[in-house]
Image (cartoon, rainbow, N blue to C red):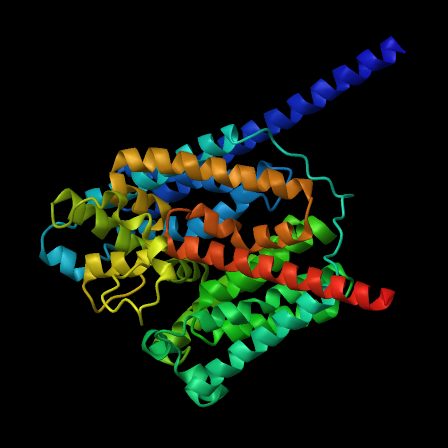
Amino acid sequence: MLTNLNKYNINEVKRVNGNLYKKIITIILFSFLVFFFLNSIIAEKNYFFILLLTLTYTILIVPFFTNDDLLNPLTILIATQILSVTDVLHRYINRLYYNKANSLDVFNDDMYVLSISLILVWLIMFYIGYIFGGKKPIVLDKIKPEVPRNSWIIILVTLIISLLGFLFAVSINGGITSMFSNMSNRVALYSGAGFLKDFVALGTVGALLLLYKGYKKTSILIIILAFFGIALFGSRGPAIYYTVLPYLLFYHYMIKKISRRTLLTIGLILVGFIIVWGQYRSYGNVERLDFSLVNTIWEASSQTAMGVTLPVLLSYLENGYINHQFFDLLFNIVFAIVPRAIWLEKPAIDTTGIVGELLFGPEHWGRWVGPYGLSYLSFGWFGVIIMGLITGVVVKKLYIKLTRKTSLMYVIFYCFTIRLFIDLFSTGGQLKIVWFGLWLILLSLISYFSWKKKKVMVKT
């Protein structure tokens, strides 16, 4: 018996070591491929910049091929950051400077190098925090948490709210056709009514519960309707992150594991959607589209505008046009509880809005600089290190709790918000986390008390 046990231990050690060697070889090969590819497309041989980019892409992408759990938070990190990094590369290659910054003579190639350095350091600190955030969890497929009591109440309420939110948006536009054509004017049109797409997103909660209860086709139909309902607001990111991403995560952890091939196929379709929808939103047609591989990648990445906002932010900070904000941007969520109707002089609280005005003037709105840019804007390199660490620890803790599957409502909360926790210190992200958290708590309470009332009525 001991001999058999020793053989098992030896074979297990060999298996683990074999997997480790495969991962190391994968990382090395991928790094070389990325380095040579970047070297071939960057005309000016700035090898330090190429090396930084190689490390950044390797750190981002390799976990997708080496991690046992395909949709772990590191994959979500790839989905949220890969296009941003690529846009910095795109702008560097094509020298797509921002005119205002260029006229101030503060925008140069060094800012691109600094931008990638910033992203790389934040990613490294995130990974360190993620590693020390807890032991690697084991995803237990056989654990199936109970459906909330009287869950049909939750499904009905979320679908009704979602439908009403969409219908109200349609009424603002004067019809679905007008809603489609008004996407380019979405900021002014939905001023004060941006919450409507959050209402539409609640339909995803109903779809996830239907999926868990076995109504797969119905749940897919609802997700598609919610997806296009949000997209008609002119919002491509929210359309994906509030419908498709939660559905994929929930399906992966609660129904059946999703393969890499399936995930890559869905990813390519969504990239196509981002390009087409962005083109139509900006120009009212899709005549300028070029779906060659390189142009598709450049076009998709340019939608993030990270290659503009981050270098400009760093340029202005380095040259003293703006100052570090320290704690000014981190706790604006406390002002959210006071309606602007009561506090007429209430300051702007949305991080992207504040940054947009800070960099480009009051005519610009919603400029995102990523968690690394916000960290640097707040505290410089110290902020990048500390805030990256904290974010990694928090995300790992949430992931560990997910794998235990103690509550179906927590799984739904995780599927909606894990992306937002990656941008933990953004006021917009914090508000969305609180929004979805409070709604799920409220829906759980409604479900519980309606079940309790029904139980009392049955007894009497």
Taking depth in this image into account, of 242 and 167 the one nearest to the observer is 167
Residue farthest along the front direction in this orientation = 460
Residue 189, position as x, y percentages in the image: 35, 79
Nearest the eye: 203 or 58 = 203
Q: Is residue 344 left or right of residue 204?
A: left
Report the residue at 33% width, 38% height from top.
50
* Residue at the far bottom in the pictured view: 174
**Which quarter of the picture shows residue 398?**
top right
Instruction: Tell me which corner region of the image, top left, top right, bottom left or bottom right, holds residue 14.
Output: top right
Q: Is residue 45 visible?
A: no
Residue 307: x, y in percent? 30, 53
402 with respect to 325 (left or right): right
Q: Is residue 88 left or right of residue 36?
A: left
In the rendered image, is residue 82 in sight?
yes
- The image shows residue 17, relative to residue 297, as above or below, that is above
- Figure disc tally: 0
User: Which residue lies at the image location 39% right of the left edge and 37% below the top edge?
Assistant: 388
Residue furthest toward the left? 104
Q: Nearer the viewer, residue 201 or 359?
A: 201
| Outermost residue to the right | 1
Q: Residue at x 90, y 11 (%)?
A: 1
Q: Where does the image place residue 386, in percent across and percent down from the top left? A: 35, 33
**Of 166 and 223, the residue lying toward us:** 166
309 versus 130 height, above or below = below
Q: Measured from the top left, where is residue 458 in percent x and y?
A: 85, 67
Quadrant containing the C terminus is: bottom right
